[in-house]
Image (cartoon, helix red, strand yellow):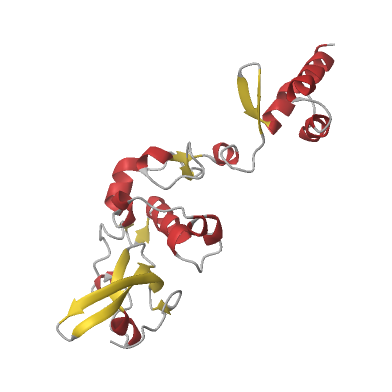
Amino acid sequence: MGVVKDLTNLVFGRLTVIEYAGLKERKSGRRAQWKCLCSCGKVLNVVGSDLLRGGSTSCGCYKNEKIGNLNLTHGQQRKGKRTSEHRSWRHMKSRCYNPNVERYPNYGGKGIKVCDRWLNSFENFFADMGPKPSPLHSLDRFPDTNGNYEPSNCRWGTREQQSRNTTKNHWIEFGGERMILTDWAKRLGTSAGNINRMMKKKSISETIEYHLNKKNR
């Protein structure tokens, strides 16, 4: 076997190459294979020569769609349209495994992965997560914002819930309560900027007590 050509990040039809996946034994010898992400959301290993000669351009979903099988569970299609839950499942995997998507650096680029139970099974994902409570809900990693996508660390969250579940938030604990800076500002009747500026010179306790006393005057 000669030098393996690097196919990482190349796109072949519906398949985007994620990374090298080792060698596969064939009758003709050992062949390099590559982990690929299909646009339908499935992750699979494909032999590099099959990609280069155009023999593999999808996980098989294109062929099934061509013959008119539009109600595949694999695609979770209803009346020819993908469900919102299936889109969430596909986008979750793209963020983690496709270096070409805009949000990859904040997910896959930081080592965030999708659990084995969900990686190639939308059925398992849907069984664990259930339907979205409303169109306003989206997939949210909770309680560990730095953790992987898995049943114990995911929920359908509203935009407000997700805005509170980000590593960019400044959490403050005082008097047995732990809230983000903007919520303390609402409680104290002031602005987050005022609290921030004061905490640069005084402790959290002094800052909160000052604004509490000012509010109760």
Q: Nearer the viewer, residue 158 or 69?
A: 158
Q: Nearer the viewer, residue 2 or 65?
A: 2
Left or right: where does residue 96 sit relative to residue 52? right
Q: Is residue 16 above or below residue 5?
A: above
Q: Is residue 141 above or below residue 217?
A: below
Instruction: Report the quarter where the C terminus lies.
Output: top right
Q: Is residue 130 visible?
A: no
Q: Is residue 22 above or below residue 114?
A: below
Please tell me which residue is depicted at 25% across the width and 61% down the height of the picture.
72
On the image, the x and y values in percent for residue 137 come to 49, 42
Tag count: 0
Please tell me which residue is depicted at 83% across the width and 34% down the height of the picture.
197
Left or right: where does residue 199 sit relative to residue 124? right
Please tell me which residue is depicted at 77% across the width and 17% down the height of the picture.
209
Image quadrant in which you'd find residue 181: top right
On the image, the x and y values in percent for residue 152 come to 38, 38
